[in-house]
Amino acid sequence: MRKASYWSCLAVVVASFSAGLGKADSLDSGWESPPREARLRAYWWWLNGCVTPQAITRDLEEMKAKGFGGALICDADGSSQDRNERAPHGPDFFSPEWRELFKHTLREADRLGLEMSLNIQSGWNLGGPGVSADDAGKKLVWSEHRVTGPAEFRSRLPQPAHRDGYYRDAMVVTYPVKSASVESPGAITFEQFLETIFGYLHNGF
């Protein structure tokens, strides 16, 4: 019985020690060659959409060679920052030509065992050639016209500066302003007025 117990204990110790070595080996090998889901992802900028099938293949093969697990495609510009020369304009985002480049990317990534993801946008705001100006991202612009009263005002208000020929009226707001010589009850500065308007826009009227 004692001899049997001795061998049983020895077997348990050896088995435990072997299991520990297996875990250590697995940790070492996982660190040296991590699975794809644990590898780095490149933030892959398609500057101004200026990419070619050859450049896509080259970039992906370099990512694979350097141990990356995949990439996130971001089709946007920004190439002219810091006085750099702007990259030539490539195919419009999600146009037929652009989609062919994207399909080529997916085929090459599959060949190399890389994962791909995509920022569904062109530039900083969600968009693309199929998005009309009415549905695109917008910004609030304004103009200012001062009137001395009391008086009846009948005139066309100056149109605020805008871009790409797109402008729509949103609101006309009047308010008393502080004067250097006259303090009107409830008067506010222009900066205070803007803070109030943006607060309404953010929280709802």
Image (cartoon, rainbow, N blue to C red):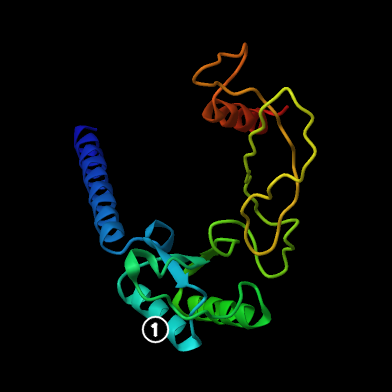
Q: Position of residue 96 (x, y in %)?
A: 67, 81
Q: Residue 39 falls in which quadrant of the image? A: bottom left
Relative placement, left or right, of 146 versus 115 is right
Label 1 secondary element: helix
Quickly name the residue at label 1: 58
Q: Residue furthest top?
A: 185
Q: Is residue 101 above or below residue 39?
A: below
Q: Position of residue 35 (x, y in %)?
A: 39, 61
Disc 1 residue crowd, few under 14, some 14–19, many 20+, Cα 10 Å: few
Q: Position of residue 4 (x, y in %)?
A: 24, 38
Residue drawn at (76%, 26%) of the image: 151
Residue drawn at (50%, 73%) of the image: 48
Q: Position of residue 25 (x, y in %)?
A: 25, 56
Closer to us: 138 or 37: 138
Relative placement, left or right, of 10 versus 115 is left
Residue drawn at (65%, 73%) of the image: 94
Closer to us: 22 or 37: 37
Q: Is residue 112 above or below residue 151?
A: below
Q: Is residue 140 above or below residue 44?
A: above
Kind of residue at disc 1: Arg
Q: Is residue 58 above or below residue 12?
A: below
Closer to us: 4 or 64: 64
